[in-house]
Amino acid sequence: MAEVSTGFLKIRYNDGRTQRFEYERIGETMANVAKVIQEGLQLGVLMLQLPDPDRLLAIPFTSIHSIEVVPRRRRCPAW
């Protein structure tokens, strides 16, 4: 099975709005995923680097109802 190189992140906010972001899955390992999630939880903010225009988006976790990652990894890190 070929490795998928593009992923999608769908964020559903508490007010019902949704946003979808596309990203390249370069160098995505279970250790990297766990590290990013852990850092975000410690900060209380989801940080996304967006390419066009080059900017950084900070979304407080208190505003987020759910986050969906598609396609999912074959195996999720064990927490």
Image: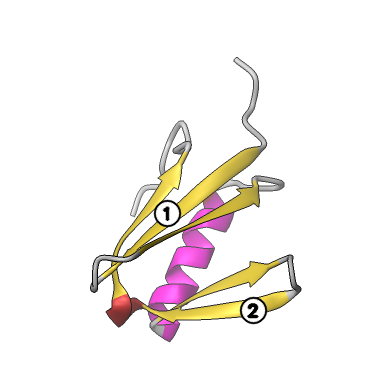
Q: Where's the C terminus, which quadrant?
A: bottom left
The percent position of residue 5, horizontal first and vertical second, equals 67, 36
Residue 33 higher or lower than 17, as above or below: above
Residue 38 lies left or right of residue 21; in this view the side is: left
**Disc count in the image?**
2
Q: Amino acid at mark 2?
A: Leu
Q: Residue placed at 57% from the left, 43% from the top?
A: 7
Q: Is residue 65 left or right of residue 55?
A: left
Which residue extends farthest top? 1
Q: Nearer the viewer, residue 55 or 47?
A: 55
Mark 2 residue element: strand
| Residue underneath mark 2 | 56
Q: Position of residue 45 (x, y in %)?
A: 43, 80
Q: In the displayed structure, would residue 55 be above or below residue 72?
A: below
Q: Which mark is residue 10?
A: 1
Front residue of this view, candidates 1 and 9: 9
The amino acid pointed to by label 1 is Lys
Q: Residue at x 36, y 48 (%)?
A: 78
Q: Residues within 10 Å of mark 1 (few under 14, many from 20)?
A: some
Residue 38 badge: none
Image point 63% across, 40% down: which residue?
A: 6
Distance Cα–Cα, label 1 vs label 2: 17 Å
Closer to the chain start, of discs 1 and 2, is 1
- Main SS type for the magenta part? helix
Q: Label 1, secondary structure: give it.
A: strand
Q: Is residue 34 magenta?
A: yes
The region drawn magenta spans 31-43
**Is 32 within the magenta?**
yes
